[in-house]
Amino acid sequence: MKNIYISVLFIFFYSSIFAQAGLKEYRYFGIKAGLTSNFSIPKYNNINLLLKSEYGDLQKEYKSKITYSPGAMFEIIYNFDSKNNKRGFVTGISVENIGYGFNYINEKMDVSAKENYRAVCVGIPFVIKYGTSNIYKNQSYFTLGLQYNFYFMQQTIQTSSWSSQMYIGNIPKEAATLSSLSLIAGINYKIYFFRIHYFTNNFINNKYTTVIPEGTITPYKHINGSNNIYLTAGINIPLTRWLTTRSWTAEKIRRALKGSKY
């Protein structure tokens, strides 16, 4: 399956470059930064999940079916905009802190806990941008593409009602997914962007099994193994003097990045 993903990625990249052969005019770097949002819905109850509380191990029950988890991203990109001002191609490198979580409660003992699963995602995007006209001048366009992702530092973070301390533990390396493919669709308006990021694989393998004194369990089976969607909103600053003269906000950011006032 991974070979199929890589092949599709290569074909997409080659087709994008070939489609713009002889049409490239504007090439420039840019930076993107934004906040991500994930809304998690558990697949079903997992009888292997227990709250390790001061009262002993308690059976978890979901407090709510939907949990919101914030994150952040930073990306350095390189733009290829075509002469016809209607399409372009973007690649670069992206670093994201992504995660999702669940709220639990044990009504009998009146205790609750929140469990988050987080990871650092380093991605290489291959994105086509297209618009009706003057995408370089106006920076208003749609985006559609792929990103190949590498996952690091997969962790479990737990907070609870019975303790002020935060528990942080590493996901077993046998349960950690190392890479995956994701799909990107979005819109850019001047220096602002919004995108939907669809990950085909989770950074945790929900089929992972382990052995405890009571027998063999699947501790992450309540986690969706695929179909993970993250929403991102942020700023996209093109690092080109010609363009930033059209946006004073972008020009101030460009000057701050260069360490100059004028």
Image (cartoon, helix red, strand yellow):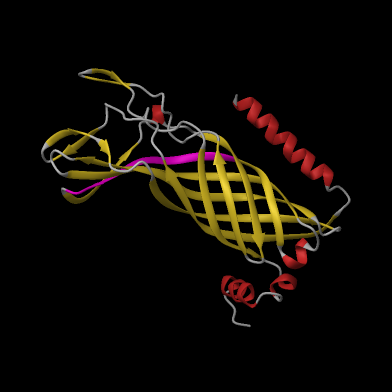
| Range of magenta residues | 148-161
Q: Is residue 155 magenta?
A: yes
Q: Which of these two is toward me, 122 or 110?
A: 110
Q: Which residue lies furthest to the left in this view?
A: 55
Main secondary structure type of the part rendered in magenta: strand
Q: Position of residue 19 (x, y in %)?
A: 83, 44
For image coordinates 43% across by 29% down, the residue present is 205
Residue 134 found in image quarter: bottom right
85 on left or right of 194 = right
For image coordinates 48% across by 39% down, the residue present is 151
Q: Which of these two is toward me, 181 or 153?
A: 181
Q: Position of residue 200 (x, y in %)?
A: 55, 34
Q: Position of residue 47 (x, y in %)?
A: 27, 26
Q: Where is residue 164 in the image (x, y as percent from the top left)?
A: 19, 53
231 on left or right of 60 = right
Q: Does the magenta stretch include residue 102?
A: no
Q: Is residue 179 above or below residue 74?
A: above
Q: Residue furthest top?
A: 215
Q: Name the image quarter holding the C terminus.
A: bottom right
